[in-house]
Image: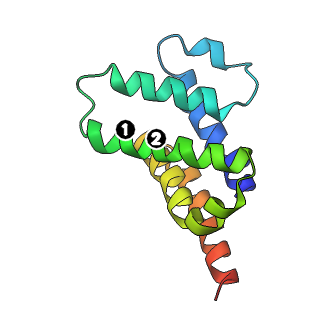
């Protein structure tokens, strides 16, 4: 899961935010998916034309919850919900138009699923 978060999810968030108004502050920033998610949630909350706002906000908050469980090494929720967490990261990548990152996260999800069979 750490590979999915650090190699694909965080970079996808940064790549999206760089292209938003004021995005130049992200160009040389330390890779910090927590602050990227905070900013993306704020962006969504302040955008009345976000097409599926309620569902998207839930997805973003699940992705943030997953990131926190991973980065704080809370193993029980990670083991119990890793599939949901990886799907949330992939879903956020799709939401922000970073489909290639979403695909890589799903590949990691499939690799993990194959280990449990």
Where is residue 73? Give x, y as percent: 75, 51
Q: Mark on residue 61?
A: 2
Disc 2 residue crowd, few under 14, some 14–19, many 20+, Cα 10 Å: some
Indicate the secondary structure of the residue bearing disc 2: helix
Outermost residue toward the bottom? Answer: 117
Q: Mark on residue 82?
A: none
- The quarter of the image holding the C terminus is bottom right
C-alpha span from label 2 to label 1: 6 Å
Decide: marks 2, 1 in contact (CB < 8 A)?
Answer: yes
Q: How is the image coloured?
A: rainbow
x 61%, y 60%: residue = 77
Figure check: 31 above or below 88: above
Figure check: 31 above or below 117: above
Which of 7/73 is in front? 73
Residue 70 located left or right of residue 43: right
Figure check: 102 above or below 65: below
Disc 1 residue crowd, few under 14, some 14–19, many 20+, Cα 10 Å: some
Q: Mark on residue 57?
A: 1
x 66%, y 83%: residue = 116
x 27%, y 39%: residue = 54
Where is residue 51? Give x, y as percent: 24, 36
Residue 76 located left or right of residue 30: left
Indicate the secondary structure of the residue bearing disc 1: helix
């Amino acid at each position: 899961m750490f590979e999915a978060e650090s190699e694909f999810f965080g970079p996808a968030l940064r790549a999206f935010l760089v292209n938003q108004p004021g995005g130049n502050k992200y160009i040389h920033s330390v890779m910090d998916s927590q602050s990227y998610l905070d900013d993306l949630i704020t962006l969504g909350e302040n955008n009345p034309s976000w097409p599926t706002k309620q569902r998207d906000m839930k997805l973003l908050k699940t992705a943030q919850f997953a990131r926190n469980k991973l980065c704080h090494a809370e193993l029980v929720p990670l083991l119990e919900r890793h599939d949901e967490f990886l799907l949330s990261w992939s879903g956020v990548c799709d939401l922000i138009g970073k489909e290639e990152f979403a695909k890589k996260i799903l590949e990691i999800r499939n690799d993990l699923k194959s280990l449990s069979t």
